[in-house]
Image (tube, rainbow, N blue to C red):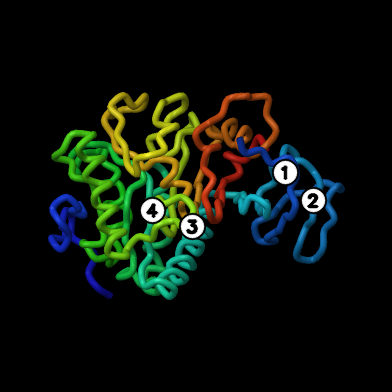
Amino acid sequence: MAKAASFLSFSTSLPKLCRPFSISITQLPQVSLNSKKLNCSISSALKISRRTVTATTKASSMASSGITTVDQNNRKVVEVFVTEEELAVSLAKYTADLSDKFAKERGSFTVVVSGGSLIKSLRKLVEAPYVDSIDWSKWHVFWVDERVVPKDHPDSNYKLAFDSFLSKVPIPSGNVYAINDALSAEGAADDYETCLKHLVHTGVINISSVSGFPKFDLMLVGMGPDGHVASLFPGHPLLKENQKWVTHITDSPKPPPGRITFTFPVINSSSYIALVVCGAGKASVVQTALGKSQNTDVFPVQMVSPEGELKWFLDKDAASKL
């Protein structure tokens, strides 16, 4: 197996400016059960066959673990796991399957990650069988948002991903695209957008025929307790940005204040989005986004609506109010 990229090793093959450095489910049209996951009773409102359950019950009665719901109209899948460990196992298989699909179809696999607890949930990818079976040479890794701090700073999303993931897999260092942290937040955002445009020009990243924005193969993102995704926070004007690919924020309500972030048109042009949410502290926002809630607020996470498939990976605590 090829040696993993060394810390802060960047490609010089790209131009200097491109250094890698409201949704509400009130009915569940289809519910699939995994008998290994499910250890609970199901309401008599469900008609159970050997492999499939068809439900007409509301999401609020479906907090049972181990249930997958499929909204075929909106290409949305919601999967609930008994434990975060089981979630991580499923997320690894999902990612590996898409890696194989896109590597065969287009010769590369463009992956966007966030920071926070999402990186921990990717840990199974660095273990057997995936660490040896995935063609890591096809991967191109980007960040949906980043704090404008040095790459060795504790707040850096790059450092978090490197320490727990990137340093343990042989993705070519030239295929890892970190921000230029020597610039201001505005400069770093402009530089990152220039990088993306170069990679579109060279065919690494596709362009959406629907939106005209870059179309990434897979986005792996988390959600904050306030419902924010990337660095797009509730009530912030950047939620309405529809021209730029990458923008900056200097007044983030969560420190550090200076960040760069993909905009919603870029996020929603993706082929696949995996939205990974764990913990009881996020259950109320999940309830609003997916279930029946009296909360009339619209959270940024409810604006995630990709051209392709959106799949929610929830542990039972995050789904406890559904």
| Pointers 1 and 2 in contact (C-beta within 8 Å) | yes
Q: The residue under label 1 is which amino acid type? A: Met
Q: The residue under label 3 is which amino acid type? A: Ser
Tell me the element at label 3: loop
Q: The residue under label 4 is which amino acid type? A: Pro
| Pointers 3 and 4 in contact (C-beta within 8 Å) | no
- In the rendered view, would you say 315 is above or below 48? above
State which quarter of the image contains the C terminus.
top right
Name the residue that disc number 1 marks: 62
Identify the image quadrant of residue 245.
top left
Name the residue that disc number 2 marks: 55
Between label 1 and label 4, give the one nearer the viewer.
4
Q: How many marks?
A: 4
Name the residue that disc number 3 marks: 271
Is residue 316 shown left or right of residue 205?
right
Q: The residue under label 2 is which amino acid type? A: Ala
Mark 2 neighbour class, 10 Å CA radius: few under 14, some 14 to 19, many 20 or more: many
Q: Nearer the viewer, residue 46 or 235?
A: 235
Q: Name the residue at 46% across, 24% down.
A: 235
Circle nearer the N terminus (1, 3): 1
